[in-house]
Image: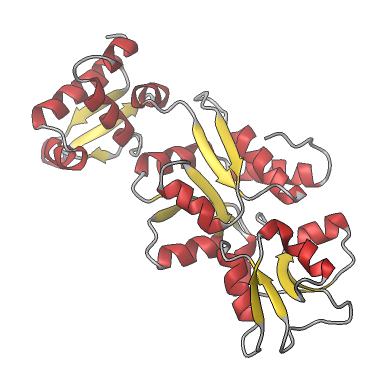
């Protein structure tokens, strides 16, 4: 049956649901039984059986029964499964590209994902790891780029995301620094007003860590306004990204922070925990080394950013 007719047939919706679920499995994996599939996607047993037959007839999958060992996914045509599942694009959200490192990461992701499956990727940019993750949890975006530290803290607190790709230390930023309005200052002092973006897990917790034992006043500051407020003296100190300070040659006093084994410097991709098919797809689509090579070329000025 032609794919378009398949999608609009009586069993089209159930076939679409099943195609999306099977994207989470690799060739050679045992897939769930009809009963398990029935419970997972809330379809009648007969409907599930018909959908499996349609997927096999279309050539999207080849299945092989092994008796009590279950049914094995012998072969899958990812492009056909994506078409049947209705996945035509992948949407991601990452930090605002205000540094060469972020521009390089965005360039690497876009260049890498648009590969043999012809799936275009679109990136949006948003400040605050909490804001980006909330977009993923509401299915506004498929994935978010945040720091390893923020991801682990959110997962530990029970937020329903999973890490599907890690890019290594300093892929997110070189270092966080404490930056001061007073050029002679190198440490947090009692009585200071400290700027903090409450939507950023990293910055909020690092700020609290940096100010421990000190009597300070916190002022909620949008992340993109941090340096402006420090330089103008509206706040006495804040935590910021050393990449931007060095690239824009800000004349400000700062000190490098050594925080949580530098987990704040590593970029990771997270998806909603329940979206196993998307986790599998992104993991197979993205080549970490290729992304990092593109990032390095952009940072060295040898590749024009493109995202």
From this view, report whether residue 8 is shown above or below residue 188: above
Task: Identify the residue at horizontal 45%, vertical 63% (top origin).
Answer: 154
User: Residue 55, position in %: x, y?
Assistant: 26, 21
Residue 293 relative to residue 247: left or right: left
Compared to residue 62, the image places residue 109 above or below, namely below
Q: Quadrant of the image for the N terminus?
A: top left
Q: Which is more toward the observer, 275 or 61? A: 275
* Residue 252 to residue 68: above or below: below
The residue lying at 27 percent from left, 24 percent from top is: 62
- Residue 302 pos. (x, y %): 83, 39
Residue 201 in view (yes/no): yes
Which quadrant of the figure has residue 230?
Answer: bottom right
Q: Position of residue 266 (x, y in %)?
A: 61, 59
> Residue at 38% across / 56% down in the picture?
160
In-image side of 119 versus 5 (left or right) = right
Q: How many marks?
A: 0
Residue at screen point 74% across, 50% down:
98
Q: Is residue 43 left or right of residue 275?
A: left
Please state the horizontal and vertical placement of residue 205, each as a whole percent of the image: 57, 73
The residue positioned farthest toward the front in the image shown: 234
Q: Quadrant of residue 276?
A: top left
- Quarter of the figure with the C terminus: top right
- Any part of residue 176 in sight: no
Looking at the image, residue 213 sits to the left or right of residue 22; the answer is right
Considering depth in this image, is 264 or 60 the residue closer to the camera?
264
């Amino acid at each position: 049956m032609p794919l378009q007719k398949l999608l609009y047939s009586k069993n089209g919706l159930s076939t679409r649901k099943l195609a999306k679920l099977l994207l989470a499995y690799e060739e050679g994996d045992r897939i769930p039984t009809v009963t398990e599939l029935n419970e997972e996607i809330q379809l009648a047993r007969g409907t599930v059986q018909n959908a499996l037959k349609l997927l096999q007839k279309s050539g999207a999958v080849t299945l092989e029964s092994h008796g009590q060992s279950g049914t094995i996914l012998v072969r899958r045509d990812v492009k056909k499964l994506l078409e049947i599942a209705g996945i035509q694009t992948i949407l991601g959200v990452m930090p605002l590209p205000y540094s060469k490192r972020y521009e390089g990461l965005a360039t690497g992701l876009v260049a890498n994902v648009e590969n043999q499956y012809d799936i275009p990727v679109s990136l949006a940019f948003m400040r605050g790891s909490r804001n980006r993750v909330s977009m993923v949890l509401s299915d506004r975006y498929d994935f978010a780029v945040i720091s390893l530290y923020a991801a682990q803290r959110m997962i530990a607190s029970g937020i329903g995301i999973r890490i599907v790709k890690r890019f290594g230390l300093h892929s997110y930023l070189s270092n966080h620094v404490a930056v001061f309005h007073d050029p002679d200052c190198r440490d947090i002092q009692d009585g200071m007003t400290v700027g903090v973006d409450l939507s950023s897990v990293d910055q909020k917790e690092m700020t609290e860590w940096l100010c421990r034992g000190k009597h300070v006043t916190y002022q909620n500051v949008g992340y993109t306004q941090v340096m402006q407020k420090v330089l103008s003296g509206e706040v006495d100190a804040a935590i910021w990204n050393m990449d931007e300070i060095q690239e824009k040659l800000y004349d400000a006093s700062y000190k490098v922070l050594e925080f949580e084994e530098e987990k704040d410097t590593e970029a990771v991709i997270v998806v909603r925990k329940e979206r196993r098919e998307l986790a599998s797809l992104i993991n197979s689509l993205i080549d970490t080394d290729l992304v990092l090579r593109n990032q390095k070329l952009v940072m060295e000025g040898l590749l024009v950013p493109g995202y």
